[in-house]
Image: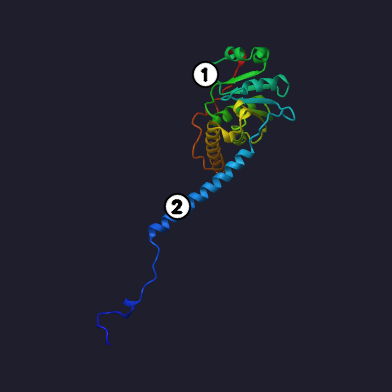
Amino acid sequence: MTLPLDQDPLDDAVAPPSPPRRRVVRAAIVVAFALGFLFGAIGFVGFLSQLRSGELKPTRNADGIVVLTGGSSRVADAMELLAGGYGKRLLISGVHPTNGVSEISRTLPDSERLLTCCVDLDRSAVNTRSNAVETKRWAHERGFRSLIVVTSNYHMPRAIVELSHEMPDIELIPFSVIGDKWRDEPWWFSGPTLRLLLSEYAKYLAAEVRVRLAEVGLDLVPEASAPPADAPRKPATASAN
C-alpha cells in the first residue's frame, strides 16, 4: 500500500500531550503563595518570640530613658523607672501638640516634681520612625550613650529596628510594657489582639526591609519630616509647658 504523495508518515504518530500553559502558570502561583505563607508564618513565629510576656526591670541603669507614646501605661511605667533612678532624664516622644505638663500631671499626680525637673517633651514625632529621629537628636544633645526604651511589647521589635538604625552608637535597653489585653487572655483567643499583632508584624517587616536597603545606600522612603541638620531643635522641657 502506498501513501499519498502529500502525506507525511510522521503525521500518524501521536505526539505526547503537553500540559496546558494555563495549568502551569496556575500551579506556579499556588506554589508561590504556599511558600510565601510558609515563610510568613515562620517569620511571624520569630516575631512573637521577641515579645516579652512579663515586665522585667532593666538589669542596669542608663544615661536616659525614652518612652514612645501610643499605648496604655507607657508613660506611667517610664516615670516609675525615672523615679527609681534608672536614668538621668526622660524623653516623652510623640506628645500631642496641644498637651503639656498639666495634662500629664493630672494623670500622674505623684510625678509632678520629676515632670518639672527631669522630663522633656517631644511634640514633633508622629510615628515610630520620627520617634527615632527625635530621640537621636535629644540623646546626642545630652551626650547620652545608653537609653532605656519604653514601649508596648508588641511595638518593641519595630521600635528597636528604627532606633538602632538612627543611633548605632547608643546602647538600647528595652523595657516592654504589658497591656491589660495580654494579661486578661492569650492573644490567640482574642480577635482584636491577633489583628493588632498581624498589623504590627507587617509594619515590622516593612521597617526591616527599608532599614536594610538604607544601609546599602537605597533609601527608598526618605524621612520627609526630619529637619535639616543645620537647624537642630531641642525637645521642650516639661517645666516650660
In the picture shown, does residue 48 fall above or below 85?
below
Which residue is at a point 70% across and 26% down the rendered structure image?
63
User: Residue 237 at what x, y percent from top left?
Assistant: 61, 17
Which numbered disc covers residue 29?
A: 2
User: Residue 202 at what x, y percent from top left?
Assistant: 53, 38
In the picture shown, does residue 32 fall above or below 223?
below
Q: How is the image coloured?
A: rainbow
Give the foreground label among 2 and 1: 2
Look at the image and tell me in which quarter the C terminus lies: top right
Q: Label 2: how many residues lie within 10 Å, few (<14), some (14-19) or many (20+)? A: few
Looking at the image, the residue that sits furthest to the bottom is 1
Residue 104, quarter of picture: top right
Residue for badge 1: 97
Q: Label 1: how many residues lie within 10 Å, few (<14), some (14-19) or many (20+)? A: few
Which numbered disc covers residue 88?
A: none
Residue 187, quarter of picture: top right
Look at the image and tell me in which quarter the N terminus lies: bottom left
User: Residue 145 at what x, y percent from top left?
Assistant: 69, 30
Q: Circle 2 sits in a helix, a strand or a loop, which is it?
A: helix
Residue type for callout 2: Ile
Residue 68, quarter of picture: top right
Which residue is at a point 62% across and 21% down the rendered structure image?
75
